[in-house]
Image (cartoon, helix red, strand yellow):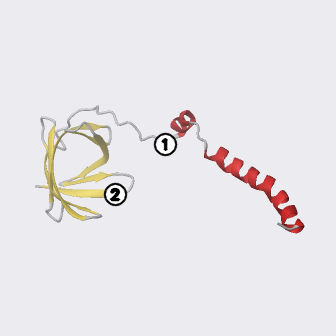
Amino acid sequence: MNLANFSMYQTIKPLFAVVIASVLLAGCKNEEDEAQNAPTMPTIEFKGAVDKVYAGKWQTPDKKLVLTLEETGAASMIGKISSPGGEKDVNTKMEWKIDGKNLLFLNEDGTKSAYGIKIKGSTLELSTAKTTSVYNKM
């Protein structure tokens, strides 16, 4: 190694050590802090009551999906839904309640979902932040 290369090596060596140390320290995570700062999904409480105004069989305009809301609080959704992978068969049993302006579902597996609900004559609208689905009374 000549003198010029040795001098450059001596200059770069401490800088390289600082870069490696910075990378290693930046990669260290405090799992407790991470858990506290993680985004959370809002909890849906399955509360409210069955409202007979909404009870009945409802069908999408394309007739591919039927939503049944029974006066007993039982519900089902049978038919086909569109998904990014194409159409999927649906045959789901659940419970339903109305809480204010929301339709709440409790699925057999314990998952809960909430939809904004509006009824206009024989049309039912269910909405989320991203979509609105329309059903016609059968």
Farthest residue to the front: give it: 1
Mark 2 lies on a secondary structure that is loop
Rendering coords of residue 89 (x, y %): 16, 57
For discs 1 and 2, the disc positioned in front in the rendered view: 1
Secondary structure, mark 1, is loop
User: For residue 132, what is the image quadrant?
Assistant: bottom left
Q: Is residue 59 above or below residue 49?
A: below
C-alpha distance separating marks 1 and 2: 22 Å
**Residue at the (22%, 38%) spot, across then down:** 109
Quadrant of the rendering where the N terminus is positioned = bottom right
Q: Which residue is mark 2?
A: 131
Name the kind of residue labelled 1 in the image: Pro
Q: Residue at x 51, y 36 (%)?
A: 35
User: Which disc number belongs to residue 101?
Assistant: none
**Residue 54 image-quadrant placement:** top left
Q: Nearer the viewer, residue 70 or 137?
A: 70
Q: Quadrant of the C terminus?
A: bottom left
Q: Residue at x 23, y 32 (%)?
A: 49
**Pick the front one: 34 or 73:** 34
Give the number of the disc on residue 39. Answer: 1
